[in-house]
Each structure stands twice: as structure tokens, then as C-alpha cells.
Image (cartoon, rainbow, N blue to C red):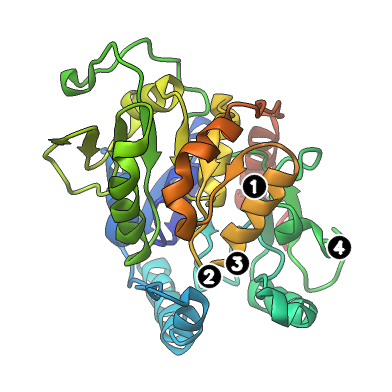
Amino acid sequence: MPRILFAVLNWGLGHATRSIPVIRALQKAGASVVLASDGDALQVLKRAFPKVETRELPGYNIRYGRKNSLVAIYGQVPHVIRTVSREHRILRSWHKEEVFDGVVSDSRFGMWLSDVPSAFIGHQIAVLPPKPFQAFHMTAFGVHKQIIRPFSDWWLPDDPTLRLAGDLLHRFPLPKHNSPRSPRVNWIGVLSRFSGESRPYGFLDNRLNTHEPFIAAVLSGPEPQRSMLQEALMAVAPKLPYPLWIVEGRPGGQEFKTLPNIKIIPFLDGPDLQHLLRSAEVVISRSGYSSLMDYVVLGISKLVLVPTPGQTEQEHLGQNWRNHNRAAVCLQHNITHLPEYLSQAQKCAPLPFNDELLSHTVHQWLAICKGKHFT
């Protein structure tokens, strides 16, 4: 039974939730998995896999600015580089004590080993610069290739026919399978924590039971922007046609709060979150890539996306989905006009997808981990 370390970036909850189906696929294929992360992402993994061994890694601790998220992120680059170096040293010490047959990393750049297969999960071929600096996209592409070069495999969480990631993944040519000193590239399809789960027909938590229509807002991402969006939504809630249910995305939270036209829920996962998303008249969400994949898998199309200000990835994904009539997009400073965007969301349609790509890639990679083909 191959022993696999699975490391996940703690940047919002999306990396942890989209890793759930990959972890399940590894287990189903016969692997013994050890999970590693930090903060809320680690808590999400523990909730999803309570019997699986977990280990803690140093946090990247990335925070967005209140006005310019991009400047704030760039200012934290030296800290991120130090953390990547530190996590790589930690991984090597773990591997020395107890050998791993393979490593899977969802966006943690230091989680690779030179002597065992190491797969990187990432939906960006390069960090997307803001519009005034688009000329630097090719430079970012070159930097990204160097960063992931130590990995033996690159797993792409997208459907090659749907191209959900837009320019984040499809603007430049992917490395060819025979390219020297480049990772092998494989598609693993649309990833969602809800993949393979049966459809619930009611809430398990009695506090959620209702016969009235509602609008659901699912919050995610680093502070302070997560709380800023919540405050803006609470301010506009009296203008909405239905009560607003806000899922805060705080795994450690416990208490529900009920205010006029607002229900505040600290955290939901599993069947209750799925039922909430399927039952809502409209879903309001950040345009994070993992959230978008969840909506594709659940067939949810009545979406209002609110990109994190200054987060170029979410801004591009929001624009891409709006251009393809997959969602309505409301910028955060326009939240006061949210009722208009709710009407736009009613006109969008769900997307089909291929759910067999992940299983095929995992089985092939585990064969490599067993030493049959790895060089």
C-alpha cells in the first residue's frame, strides 16, 4: 500500500475542499494518505477525514489589503519564500523518519521530494498581473515554470473542453509530456467536495429547516476582505426580496445568529452545505476557482459572483464566467445594487462536465509511486 503525503495550502478554504475528492480517489485506489496543512484548511481536512493522520505545516499567513490586495500580497512575497523553504525542510525531515512513496501538493511550492513522485495541483499557468502590467504575464509564466519544475507531475483541475479557468491556465502552451526537466501534465477534471455524494433531501441540522425561500451567501478567502464583504451584504439585506443566509466560512464557529432578514451560519460542510446551495433562490459567492468547480458539479447556475477587489485571478474568472453567461458578476463596491444582479443570475444555465479524468490520473500515478515507471 503506497504511503502518500498530501499537503494543502491554507488560503481560504478552496484548496482544502477541492482536495477532498483527490484524497478520496487516492484512498479508493489503495493508498494510505497522510494530510498536512495549517489553520482553517487543516480543520476542514480533519472534519472530512477524522480517522486520517494529520500533520501541521507553517502557515503562509497571506492577508489582503483593505484597498489594494495586490500590493499587500506582493509585500508578503519574502515571507512566502521563507515559508516555502521551511516547509521543504520539514518534508525532508518527515521523509527521513518515515518514508513516503509519493507527495501531492495543492499549491504548496515546497512540498516535493526529488527521489519520489511529487504531484503539484494548480489551475494557473502563471500569476495573472493587473491590466496595466499585462506585458509581464509572459515573465510570470517563465517564473511559474521554474517554481514547479522540481515536481514530477502537474495535475490540472479543469475540464479541457469547458476551459473553466480561462487565461489562468489556457493562455500559454502547457509543457509537453516529453519536455526535458518539465513535469508530466495530466488533467484531473472538475474537482468538488460534493463529487460522488448523494443528493440530500433536507437539512440534517434542525436549525436550518425552513419552508420559506432564501438567498445564500457563501463567504471565503483571507481577511479583511472576507469580513468586508459580510458587512456589505448585511447592509444591503433589507433591500433583498428574500431573507439572506450568510455562511461565514469559519470552521471553528458554533452559534447561529438570527437578525431581521438575515441568518448567520458560522460554517457548513457535507450534506447541509450541499442542500443549502441547491435550495437557495440565488447563491452569492466569491469567484474563487474551487467554489466555481463546486457549482459546476452541483449544477448550480443562479450565481452572483463578487470577486475579491484587487485579486486578479478572481476578477478574471468573474469576467470569464460573465462573458460565457455562466454567472452574474457584481463588484464589491456595487453591492448596494445587488437586487439588479439577482435578476441577471436567473438567466444563466448549468454546465456538463467529465467526471472520469481524476480516477484515471490517480491510478496511473500510484503505479509510478510503486516504482514501476519512475525515473
The residue located at (28%, 60%) in the rendering is 39
- The disc labelled 2 sits on which kind of residue? Gly
User: How far apart in space, not on screen, are marks 3 and 4 (Cα)?
Assistant: 20 Å
Please tell me whether mark 4 or mark 2 is closer to you in this view.
Answer: 2
Label 3 vs 1, first from the N-terminus? 1
Q: Residue at x 22, y 22 (%)?
A: 208
Residue matched to label 3: 312
Front: mark 3 or 1: 3
Choose the circle earlier in sequence order: 4 or 2.
4
Q: Which residue is mark 2?
A: 310
Mark 3, other Cα within 10 Å: few <14 / some 14–19 / many ≥20 = some
Residue for badge 4: 173
- Decide: marks 3, 2 in contact (CB < 8 A)? yes
As measured in the structure, the alpha-carbon distance from the residue carrying label 1 to the one carrying label 2 is 23 Å
Residue located beneath label 1 in the image: 157
In this view, the residue in front, 88 or 299, is 299
Q: Residues within 10 Å of mark 4 (few under 14, many from 20)?
A: few
Q: Residue at x 66, y 62 (%)?
A: 124
- The image quadrant where one finds the C terminus is bottom right
Between 336 and 264, which is closer to the camera in this rendering? Answer: 336
Q: Secondary structure at mark 1?
A: loop
The answer to whether 320 is drawn above or below residue 131 in the figure is above
- Kindly identify the amino acid type of the residue bearing the numbered disc 1: Pro
Sequence-earlier tag: 3 or 4? 4
Alpha carbons under labels 3 and 1: distance apart: 19 Å
Name the mark nearer the viewer: 1 or 2: 2
Q: Are marks 4 and 2 in contact (CB under 8 Å)?
A: no
